[in-house]
Image (cartoon, grey):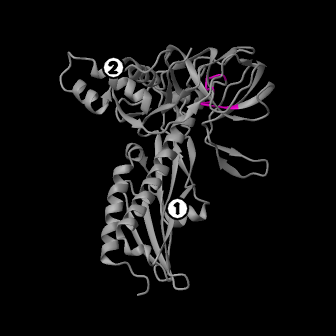
Amino acid sequence: MPNAFSKEERVAFENVLEGFNDALVLSRNVSVYNTDSSSMERSNNIIWRPMPYVAQSFSGTDMTSNFKDSTQLAVPATIGFSRSAPWAMTATELRDTLQEGRLGDAAKQKLASDINLAIMNVAATQGTLVVKRTAAASGFDDIAAADAIMNETGVQSFDRYMALSTRDYNNMASNLANRANMVGKPTTAYEKAYVGNIAGFETFKLDYANRLLARAGVTVSINGANQYYTPKATSTATTGETANVDNRYQTIAITVTSGTVRVGDAFTILGVNNVHAITKADTGQLKTFRVTAIVTGAGGTGTVQISPPIISGGGSTDAELQYKNCTATPASGAAITFLNTVDANVNPFWQKDALEILPASYAVPSDAGAAVMRASTDQGIEVVMQKQYDINTMRTKFRMDVLYGVVNKQPEMSGIMLFSQT
């Protein structure tokens, strides 16, 4: 068989895959949903994934008037990440098998980094629980603040994770290392800058982190009353077609008196408090939101897309009562206060069920002149390695490929922490 892999290359590929698994730190801590390849190709690589239901309960024994429809919300998940690491070697270069192994390791490291980066970007840009800290990272109190906002929102208390920038993580390790009255953990923190599990979160150190720019000196208010959102499972077009609705976003009108608004900004609205997802009790804390898109302008009077939507029960529908997430609809002219007041690293945190990775695969023919090897990571992500020899140039081409999707099913079960804010 032309271009067949030698035994040495097969062993090398198995070693590369083992290292690939080790490098997938973040993808191990999100949910995995496996799709059918044929169905995904026919649906343009998009599948709608259900958001968690929220049930209602009532007092008494007579439930005659309480048998109402439930609204199931869903979000579109797309297999949209296609990453490849190609390289070529001449016939003389192939004499040094060590170099071949190093190139394979480099390709593995880059693809694993791409997958981790995709997960981090989704968590950092779409998480809506925002924890603002006015000092540098110091340890338990910081993580406990994330624990508090999740508990108050009704997020499950298990499988919680936080990824911290290197400097913020090391600041926490420094605080832990100085706790001489604790046994074991301070020593590990001092020797390896390791934090581990704190306040119910398993923490991880990032060697790269997103940055969120300051929005200090910006004056913005709500433009117009009754800007609440009514969740719905589907919508019907004027032509009669029914389509699913993505209920993670809402467009609101704002007035920008000074400065500009940008995608990623985190903010609160005067008079709009967070509620517990199940009990609907007022937490006494302002609801946090993110700007996800600029629709008609970031200065003057315009509209922006935000997440999560303002579900205050303003329309008194069953769906609003079921998915209510804040105490009130903002008043016209209500002040918007931005939380990202100093340029800072974004430290995402999430509950495992919020983020989901969708492994996919390529249908690469194995009898078309190129040698093909396949293997799957622990998360089900298929790694395809191909090799093809060109007799004209005596060069051998190699490539490693992965195909996958990442989705944030519930932005209110994920968020970001910002340090050193004013």
> Which of the pair 21/363 is nearer the observer?
21
Asked which secondary structure carries label 1, the reply is: strand
> x, y (%) of residue 8?
31, 73
Magenta highlight on residue 199: no
Type of residue at label 1?
A: Ser
List the residue tagged with mark 1. Answer: 84
| Quadrant assignment for the C terminus | top right
Q: Is residue 416 visible?
A: yes
Q: Residue at x 43, y 62 (%)?
A: 103
Give the residue furthest to the bottom.
1
Give the residue pinned by disc 2.
175
Tell me, yes or no, whether the highlighted magenta stretch contains residue 309: yes
Residues at marks 1 and 2, CA–CA distance in whole angstroms: 41 Å
Q: Residue placed farthest to the front in the image?
A: 92
Residue nearest the observer in this picture, 387 or 74: 387
Main SS of the magenta segment?
A: loop
What x and y, as percent, mark residue 132? 51, 19
Residue depicted at 46% across the width and 22% down the height: 149
